[in-house]
Every structure is written in C-alpha cells, then in structure tokens.
Image (cartoon, rainbow, N blue to C red):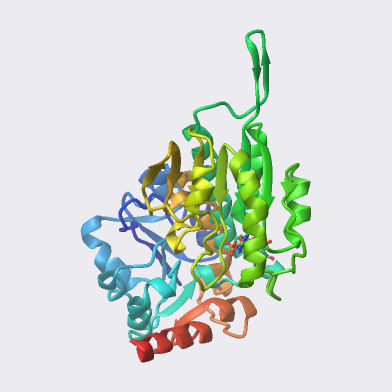
Amino acid sequence: MTIVFIPKESRAGEARVAAVPETVEKFIKAGATVRIESGAGQAAGNLDDDYTKAGAELVAEADAPNAWGAADLVLRVQPPTSEEAARIRKGAILVSFVMAKDNASLVRELASAGTTCFAMELVPRITRAQVMDALSSQATVAGYKAALLAASGLKKLCPLLMTAAGTVRPARAVVFGAGVAGLQAIATLKRLGCIVEATDVRMAAKEQVESLGASFIEVPGAEDMEDAGGYAKEASEDFLRKQREEVAKRVAEADIVVTTAQIPGRQAPVLVSNEMVESMKPGSVIVDMAVESGGNVVLSQPGETVEHNGVSVLGPTNLPSSLPADASDLYSKNVFALSNLMLGEEGKLELNLEDEVLAGCLLTHDGSIAHEATAKALNEEVTAG
Ligand code: NAD
C-alpha cells in the first residue's frame, strides 16, 4: 500500500499545504495510507484534528525526518531544501513545484539520489490535464490578490459613485498580459468598478479581455506573438516600441497598472519605464506580478513597495500564499489528480511513464534528469559556468 507523506512547508512565508482534508480522504479512498506532519495545514486553516478526522496519521515534528524516508510519495508546495531532499528514499516519488531554472543544484541532487520527481510547473497544458494545472490555479489566486492590492493602495475609490455630495469618477486600470493571472486581475478590477484596458502580444487574448467587459489596446500592425503551445513568443523590437507608444498614452491616464507579462524560460519583458511611471498621477498604484522573473516595471523590487513621484510600485512575491486557504484547496486538488494517475488497484503505485501527462512533468527519474529541456538548460549552464 502506498504511503503518502505531507511534510510541513519549510520556506519562510509559505502558508500553503499540498493536501487538504478533502484530498486526504480521496487518497485514502484510493487505497493509500496518508501521514501528515503536525501543523502542516495550520497556516492555511486546516487543523491537525481535521486531518485525523479525514483518516490521516499525524507525524510529530521530531519524527518527520524518518517519515520523509519511509514515504513512497512525498507531496509539497515549495521545492524541498537540499537537506530535506536527501531524506527521500531512493526510488520514492516527490510531487512539488521545483522551478528547475532557479534550483539547478536541487534538480541535480534529486536526479543523483534516484528520486522520481514530478514538477507541478511542468504539467502539460492539455485539456486532459487541466485539473492538474497548478500554474493556472495559483495564477488565478495571484491575479485576484494583485487587483485587491492595487485597489487598497489607491488613494481614491474604484467605482463610479453618484452621491448627494457629488460624483466620484471611476478609477482607470491598465493590465499588461491577459493570461490566467491577468484575466483574473481584469475580472476583479471590473467587479470593483474600474474602467479596465488590457494589452497582450497574443491576439487570442483580445476576445477574452472583451468578454470580461474590458477593452483591448490594439497595436497598429501587430503580428501575433503566440506560439504553438499557446504561450507568448519573444516580441520583436518593432512590436515592443509600437506597443509602448500605444500603452504609454493609457498608462498616463491610469490610476492602477497591473503587470503580468511573462515569456516561459526567459526574463519577463520590461514594459513600464520610469518615464511612464512619472507620467502617472500621484496616488496611483502599480503592481508588478512578474517581479520574481525580472519584472515588467523598471522600478519594481521583489517584496518591496517603491515610491516614485507619488506613485507606489509594488513588487509582491508569492501572492498565492497570501490567500492560503483557497490556494491550498486548489493546489491540493491538482496534486491529487496527478498522483491519482500513479495509483492502481488497492492503492498500489503503478508508474506508467507512457502516460502523456506523467511523461510531460517527469523531471528526474532513475538517476538522471528525465526532462529534456531542463537537462539541456542545466547542461548548458554547466558548460557556460
Ligand atoms: P504567462 O504567465 O506565461 O504570461 C502572461 C501573459 O503575458 C500571457 O498572456 C502572454 O501572452 C503575455 N505577454 C508576454 N509578453 C508580453 C508583452 N510584451 N506584452 C504584453 N503581454 C505579454 O501566461 P499564462 O497565464 O500561463 O497563459 C499562457 C497561455 O496558456 C494562455 O493562452 C492561456 O490561455 C493558455 N493556457 C492554456 C491552458 C490549457 O489549455 N490547459 C491552461 C492555462 C493556460
């Protein structure tokens, strides 16, 4: 019978957990045994009692290192530290965000220790795997929170109000990037009563933006920058210049700017210059959601609020962890759905690496880095370094 272990997250500021009582019940129903470190769900609002009621065994903090080693399947949100990774039994499975580019030495350690690691950020974005798509579930939470941060940092109201004392004009917002996070930021800003405009390099985003009641900022002569996988390609210098000109006009009028633009595997494009920030009214707010991958705003700093000419530039990090209850609930369901592909009759582990989803997110296996693009990127890094 498969032993599943959920250790307490160890990264500072991480409040999420990789299994909630509802998914513990599902693992048990599938025939697995579930062990969870005491206090693992507390920051997300799930108490030890809730887990034991769901059928999990509690592991005291002092016994946790042994529980890592005894598990067949370890579930995490954040990548383990090197010390934690070393506790995993050879051949056992780790399901976690890994972010290989930022954690190259961990990936090499997992590979050489013989850990079978499935990286949640690598789950293929195909219809069948939507229920396992943790990048989307967490981006949804983050986009919502970014909009709230922008609204609460603003020195004015968001909605149009007609009162006896006069009319309050609605706040204007510009959102850069209409992927999962951007669309949720747009929807939230609309609900708050803002007038919202959005820009993206993928033309498919236009319809989605408009369906939320926002307007799409058209760039004259725009080429479509969508790749075959639905992601953005790196835009040409000419496109970026035209986009800057069009968008700069809207930014100067905006009270709120939320930036979410990313290109997988690359630094985020720089889209908001200091000049654009200086064109905004004092009291306006910019939230740079891409700050952890280099930033869309020249001035943004990870985890800081920079004041410039009366404009606040926020660079929030790990936004999903600031709403840990729903973020954990959704993430846990993603993790269960992926793990369930490996559970056979009576909860036995049956690893079918021919499965398109499992093969797509297999990062390390059998002593080596199994994910081709990651292996290539890390080898190039070794050669270059
Ligand atoms: P992302 O986080 O990689 O990027 C955010 C957005 O920034 C994207 O919309 C991108 O086009 C945009 N962007 C990049 N450069 C830009 C620039 N210079 N200016 C303005 N915008 C720029 O994206 P994401 O949220 O992960 O979504 C990417 C795509 O994948 C979308 O088409 C989304 O609908 C699709 N998707 C599909 C599935 C699925 O089929 N299962 C699941 C999730 C997302």
Q: Where in the figure is residue 246, as x and y percent of width and height?
A: 68, 53
Q: Residue at x 62, y 64 (%)?
A: 240
Residue 89 in view: no
Farthest-out residue, bottom: 383
Q: Residue at x 54, y 64 (%)?
A: 269
Farthest-out residue, top: 164
Q: Where in the figure is residue 210, as x and y percent of width and height?
A: 77, 48
Locate the C terminus and report the quarter of the image it occupies.
Answer: bottom left
Question: Depth check: 234 or 3 in front?
Answer: 234
Vertical side of 108 occupied by 63: above or below: above
Q: Residue at x 42, y 88 (%)?
A: 380
Please state if 203 lies on the left or on the right of 233 as rendered: right
Q: Where in the figure is residue 63, as x and y percent of width and height?
A: 24, 62
Q: Residue at x 39, y 62 (%)?
A: 78
Please state if 109 lies on the left or on the right of 155 as rendered: left
Residue 319 in view: yes
Vertical side of 296 occupied by 264: above or below: below
Locate the N terminus and report the quarter of the image it occupies.
Answer: bottom left
Q: Where in the figure is residue 97, as x and y percent of width and height?
A: 45, 66
Q: In the figure, residue 163 lies in which quadrant? A: top right
Q: How many marks?
A: 0
The picture quadrant for ligand 1 comes to: bottom right
Question: Depth check: 135 or 234 in front?
Answer: 234
